[in-house]
Image (cartoon, rainbow, N blue to C red):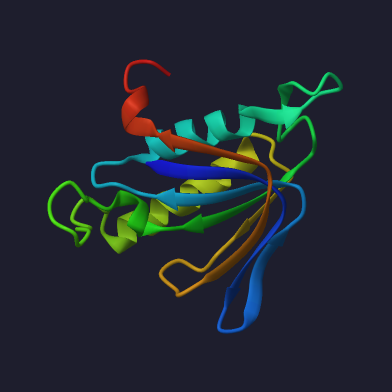
Amino acid sequence: MKAVIQRVSRASVTVNGEIVGQINEGYMILVGVVNGDTIKEAQLLARKTANLRIFTDENDKMNRSILDIDGEILAVSQFTLCAEVRKGNRPSFIESAPPDEANALYEAFCAALLENGVRKVEKGVFGAHMEVSLLNNGPVTILYDTDTWKGKA
């Protein structure tokens, strides 16, 4: 699984002109599910995300997690994170998991965030055309890819 985690002051996602998810301070996360991903990757990604320390402490050091600040998460599925772009100029999405599998793992990831102590997890609408609005705080943006953690996490 892949994730783009942005530390935000606020974020929202809109579908057909209606806000379907909205948060205050926390993370805006774009989530991509790759062929071969399993519930294990969803749970690992959620655990690592919940414990990621990118909020500043009293000494202005990134030393606090979303759990420490009682922050919120907006998670939006985005299959385009799985794009293959090494060849040619048009991305291939052959590495993206099929929609049913991807949605199940996206939902498992969101549920696992709550199980790991995140207070509030808002979501986009899987497969819909979405408009995402956010105020990146820092800016701070972290890329996660569970493939790089195999045997290490």
Please tell me whether residue 96 is drawn above or below residue 46 in the rendered image. Answer: below
Task: State the residue lying farthest toward the right.
Answer: 58
Quarter of the image containing the N terminus? top left
Callout count: 0
- Give residue 90's quadrant in the image: bottom left
Locate residue 9, reporting x and y percent: 75, 50
Relative to 94, is 19 on the left or the right?
A: right
Locate residue 146, reporting x and y percent: 37, 32
- Give residue 112's quadrant in the image: top right
Q: Nearer the viewer, residue 32 or 86?
A: 86
Locate residue 65, reporting x and y percent: 70, 29
Residue drawn at point x = 36 percent, y = 51 percent: 81
Task: State the residue lying farthest toward the top.
Answer: 152
Task: State the residue lying farthest toward the bottom.
Answer: 16
Residue drawn at point x = 86 percent, y = 22 percent: 58
Relative to 58, is 38 on the left or the right?
A: left
Quarter of the image containing the C terminus? top left
Q: Nearer the viewer, residue 54 or 90?
A: 90
Relative to 38, is 95 on the left or the right?
A: left
